[in-house]
Amino acid sequence: MRIPRLLFFALFWACIFVQGQNKQLLYDFTEIPQAGMINPGMETDFQWYGGVPVLSGIMLQAGSSGISVNDIFANDGLDINDKIRERAIFGMKPSDELSGTFQVEFLNFGFRGRNPDNFYSAGMYMEGDAIGYWFRDYAILAIEGNADRLNERFDLSHLKTRGALVNVFHIGLNKRIDRNLTIGGRAKIYSSIFDFDSTHNTGYLVTTEGESNIFATTLNADMELRTSGARALYNARDDDNVAGTAIKRAFFGGNLGVGIDLGFTYHLNEQTVLTGSLLDVGFISHTNETKNYTLKGSATVEGVIITPEGTINPDTDFYQDLINGIEETVPYEQNNDSYINFRPTKLYASLRYNFGEQIARKGNCECGINATRNTLRSKYANSVGGQIYMINRPRGPQTALTGFYQRRFGNSIAVKGTYTVDKFSYTNLGLGLNLQLGPVNLYAMADNLLAYRNLADSRYASFQLGLNIISWGK
């Protein structure tokens, strides 16, 4: 049976980006403008800010919940074939994932309006996100075959993978309602560069005793791989124009979609703060450069029956006859149908308690014509609290819990430490540093610090960094 090369491309992409998208260090780190990208309703005292193009926001995350490089390639005296069999093929579960995300900001700026309660922001960034769950039964079938597994059903639903490369244009409004409540919203336009999706597969493959032959193989399948843009990029190789094609599709030359972000910050009392945000509530409509592959229906093949006359003819290709027979019975099709993909929606929430020395905000002037009843409270030197994060994934919501402590040293230095528990690690310690050198804002963050002792044994890695120019006015 002929398997489309794009299927291999999809699986390769899903596995090469070996958690995706949790920014627990950046969330509610209000000294950093990019924190507003994950809570458009965060409190801010900037008069204006501008991100340095490309350098203002760089993020990379990669994770594997079931296995690490060290599990296979460690010099531990064990045979590598045994380790692949025991730790990968049979050791991983269909719920184990390999996933990754990267994000690069090309433009990000914000400014306070004539009404000082309103803060506007806009920009553009590129995001790539991919996830693939461990296709356990496929791996068993590929490595061991089905000769010794009579009547055992291989579950075709184990194949679940999706990924996208998207350019995002956004514009937002952050509004102070009063001293206790700040809300915000952001509108987004998605320009898809490429997309693949194969997440609703069902069916099985089973081998039983045959009637006309020794064995009979039955395939009952309802499977689909949907792609858009991938073929355009693939064909652009012939003209050495992959970059040009990608840029064209990034600037409204591909498939478009819309979405929104929402967020808020609310003071329960003078020192206790509740925050929350809902991100990427939206979709992309894929209408051009689509190519889809389907396998729907049921078929039983008993192999090639070799007659005495067939053995006499030396030109008989029994294997090709078998392949042709399968292709004639298996309902494999291709089409160019349009489809809609919903974005991976994310939810953040936190409860923060502030204490210690109070630090006046740079923009916290309560005099002159800009004074308003909504003047922000002073910051505290210390903050402690907890955060929750959820993202919708093909096998259901994925959750992470984070405890954090933040320490401010005046308005120049702020440090945030986190401890996160999720499906990738129970020992994820992270550290974020923000430096304010006059108008220059520099931040850097890294997760899972204990794993840096042996990166090959790590199942998760993440870092973020950025450079901005910030003004608080006079």
Image (cartoon, helix red, strand yellow):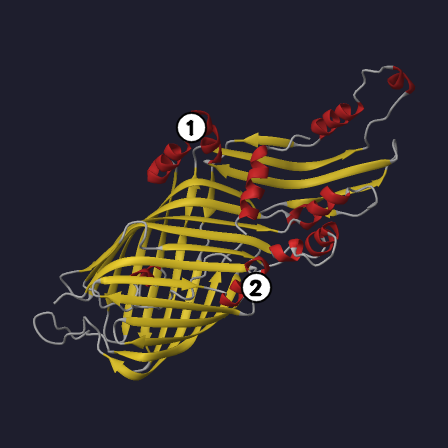
In the rendered view of the protein, which quadrant contains the N terminus? top right
Q: Secondary structure at mark 1?
A: loop
Q: Is residue 390 above or below residue 330?
A: below
Mark 2 vs mark 1, CA separation in Å: 41 Å
Residue beneath disc 1: 240
In the rendered view of the protein, which quadrant contains the C terminus? bottom left
The percent position of residue 173, horizontal first and vertical second, equals 25, 59
Q: Is residue 188 left or right of residue 93?
A: left
Q: Residue at x 22, y 61 (%)?
A: 470
Q: Nearer the viewer, residue 52 or 179?
A: 52
Crowd rating for badge 2 (residues with CA inside 10 Å; few <14, some 14–19, many 20+): some
Query: Which amino acid does the dot numbered 2 rest on?
Result: Lys
Upstream in sequence: badge 2 or badge 1: 1
The percent position of residue 200, horizontal first and vertical second, equals 59, 46
> Residue 423: which disc?
2
Q: Residue at x 73, y 29 (%)?
A: 326
